[in-house]
Image: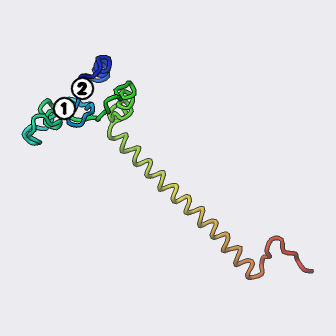
Amino acid sequence: MKAPKWFVTELHEFDPDLRIRWSGHMEMWHLERQVRRGLHPGTIRTDGYHDDYVRARDGFILVACVPPRMLCREIFEKLRTSDLWSNGGWQKIIRDIEEGEQAVEDKKWTDFQDKIKHLSAEVYNFISYRSGSRIFPGEAVKW
């Protein structure tokens, strides 16, 4: 099978190192990217028709598997949003993860402090009522 010409053209405009290839083995489209250092074909399956072997032989890696009728322009948007380098690289990803973890930790401490403050107020009121230095709200004072 061949991919639609419009899709191949837009794919090469989006990134010339990408290709779309039909996998008869999986019956899906394989979106693949050319790499400088791929696996040597002798290090993987020896079946010359297997997808891993074809990719290694041609110097490509698998980016995504696309169902037969799903070749559409939305794929380009998904590729754009998942591209590591266009989104700031590893350093930004690490920073985002650490900031997210810090926010979760800060929220846990804030929730814990609020809970302790509430429990402390309850204990204080209970001891005050018990010792008689305070009366329950709504309780009438007897003269």
Give the residue pinned by disc 1.
Answer: 60
Crowd rating for badge 1 (residues with CA inside 10 Å; few <14, some 14–19, many 20+): many
Where on the picture, by quarter, is residue 22? Answer: top left
Vertical relation: 128 (above or below) 38: below
Residue visible at 63% across and 70% down in the picture: 120
> Which structural element holds mark 2?
strand
Q: Where is residue 119 in the image (x, y as percent from the top left)?
A: 63, 69
Above or below, 46 against 139 in this view is: above
Query: Please, what is the three-letter code of the amino acid marked with disc 1?
Result: Phe
89 to 113, vertically: above or below = above
- Residue at x-position 71% and y-position 73%: 125
Please provide percent x and percent y for residue 74.
Answer: 40, 27
Of residue 99 and residue 83, the one placed in the foreground of this image is 83
Q: Return the residue nearer the eye: 107 or 48.
A: 48
Q: Residue tagged by mark 2?
A: 19
Q: What element carries label 1?
A: strand
